[in-house]
Image (tube, rainbow, N blue to C red):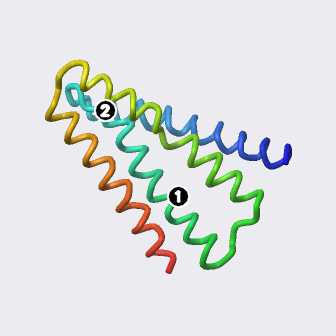
Amino acid sequence: MIRLMLIAGLGGFLGTCLRYLVGRYINHIAPAANFPWGTFAVNVVGSLLIGLLYGLAERHRLLSPALSALLITGFCGGLTTFSSFSDDLYRLLSDEHWGLFTLYLSLSFALGLTMVMIGREIVR
């Protein structure tokens, strides 16, 4: 169990580093007023990736417990940012950006779920 926990931690470190870099890059190239594009992008991409990985694990049994801990629990857990997402929503509400709040919440949910479905379908 400790071995898998350390493997998941390594994946989380790598996913978090990538989230930081992607978030900074996207916010640099698309500095839209008040809309958290960086968090949005990593959540959508992370949702596709986790759909692909779970699909591979289910269909082809390609992921060992260690690889699952590294990639799904660790990397995807570090890459996607639900806590950041929730804070972004809170800030939009606090600043009374009702339209951006609604847009961000609905697009994140719809595209996140869609990307997981697409990822699983690609593997089928």
Residue at image position (21%, 30%) is 32
In the image: residue 86, left or right of residue 96: right
Amino acid type, callout 1 = Ile
In the image: residue 49, left or right of residue 114: right
Residue at image position (69%, 58%) is 68
Tag 2–tag 1 contact (CB < 8 Å)? no
Front one among 94 and 63: 94
Mark 1 neighbour class, 10 Å CA radius: few under 14, some 14 to 19, many 20 or more: many
Location of residue 96 in the rendering, given as x and y in whole percent from the top left corner:
17, 22
In the image: residue 123, left or right of residue 108: right
Amino acid type, callout 2 = Pro
Q: Marks 2/1: CA distance?
A: 21 Å
Q: Tell me if residue 46 comes above or below residue 32 in the rendering.
A: below
In the image: residue 83, left or right of residue 72: left
Residue at image position (46%, 38%) is 82
- Please give the label number shown on residue 99: none
Pointer 2 residue: 36
Q: Tell me if residue 50 comes above or below residue 14 in the rendering.
A: below
Residue at image position (63%, 70%) is 57
Mark 2 neighbour class, 10 Å CA radius: few under 14, some 14 to 19, many 20 or more: many
- Helix, strand or loop at mark 2: loop
Sequence-wise first label, 2 or 1: 2
Pointer 1 residue: 50
- Helix, strand or loop at mark 1: helix
Location of residue 94 in the rendering, given as x and y in whole percent from the top left corner:
25, 19
Q: Tell me if residue 100 comes above or below residue 55 in the rendering.
A: above
Location of residue 83 in the rendering, given as x and y in whole percent from the top left corner:
47, 33
Location of residue 121 in the rendering, given as x and y in whole percent from the top left corner:
44, 75
